[in-house]
Amino acid sequence: RHDRWVNGAAWNEDESFILTWSGNNVRTWDTVSGEERLRLSHGGDVDGAAWKEDESLIVTLRGSNVRVWDTVGGEERLRLSHEGVVGGAVWNEDESLILTWSDDGTARVWDADSGDECLRLNHDGLVNGAAWNGGESLILTWSGDGTVRIWDATTGGILFTLTGDGTPVELAQWSQDERQIRLVTQGGFVGSF
C-alpha cells in the first residue's frame, strides 16, 4: 500500500508483477500474494516508470532525471539528465539504447549500458514525444514549436520537418506501414503527411 495517491501503474509481461509509482516511491508488487517485492526511492515525486521488456531493469522519471534501476537488488544503474523536465523514455527493440524527450527542447538517445549520450535532437520548443520507426533507422519527434521532425537515427541529421497549423503538436505517430505521419495539434488540426 502507498501512503499517497498512486500516479501510475504498469503490468509486467506475464502479469505476475505490477509496477506502481506514488510520491517519491516506485514499487513492484507480486500480483498473487499482494506483497511488495521492491521499493525504489527518489528525492521527490516520480513522474513515470516503465519495465524493460526482459524485466531486469526499471526506468523512472523525475524532473530532469531518468534513472535506470536493477529489479533484483534495487541498485541505481544509470542516471541520465536533461536540462528540463523529462516527458518520457523508451528503450529500442534490442534494449541497447534509451530514447528520452524533455521540455528543454531536446530528444536524446543514450547508450543503455554506459549512459553515454549518443544523439541530441534539437527543437525550438519543448519536445512532447519521440518514437523510433519499426526498423529503428528513423526517430520521430513532435514539439511545442509546432513541428514534427524525422531524424536519421544513426547520424542525428534532420531528414524532414512537418508543420501543421503552427500550434504545438500534441501527438504524432507513424502509420502502420510507416509511409505517413499522423499528427494532432493543440489548435485542433488533425492530418496525415
Image (cartoon, rainbow, N blue to C red):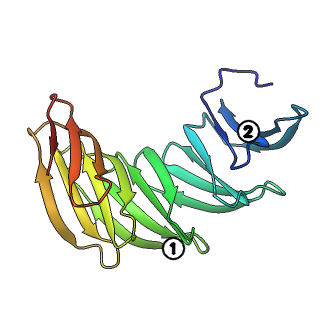
Q: Is residue 9 above or below residue 110?
A: above
* Nearer to me, 49 or 45: 49
As drawn, the residue found furthest toward the front would be 177
Q: In this view, does 149 lie above or below 27?
A: below
- Crowding near the residue tagged with mark 1, few <14, some 14–19, many ≥20 C-alpha atoms within 10 Å: few
Amino acid carrying label 2: it is Ile
Image quadrant in which you'd find residue 43: top right
Q: In this view, does 118 lie to the left or right of 39?
A: left
Q: Residue at x 73, y 48 (%)?
A: 14
Q: Residue at x 56, y 40 (%)?
A: 48
Q: Which residue is drawn at 29% across and 59% down?
A: 177
Q: Is mark 2 on a helix, strand or loop?
A: strand
**Which numbered marker is on residue 101?**
none
Q: What element carries label 1?
A: loop
Where is residue 172 drawn, in percent x and y? 28, 46
Where is residue 38 drawn, in percent x and y? 82, 45
Q: Is residue 21 left or right of residue 123?
A: right
Image quadrant in which you'd find residue 49: top right
Q: In which quarter of the image is the N terminus?
A: top right
Amino acid carrying label 1: it is Asp
Is residue 21 visible to the viewer in this orientation of the structure? yes
**Which numbered marker is on residue 116?**
1
Q: In this view, does 140 lie to the left or right of 60?
A: left
As drawn, the residue found furthest toward the left would be 165
- The residue tagged 2 is 18
Q: Which residue is drawn at 77% across and 58% down?
A: 75
Where is residue 94 drawn, in percent x and y? 56, 71
**Which label's residue is closer to the chain start, 2 or 1?**
2
* Nearer to me, 118 or 95: 95
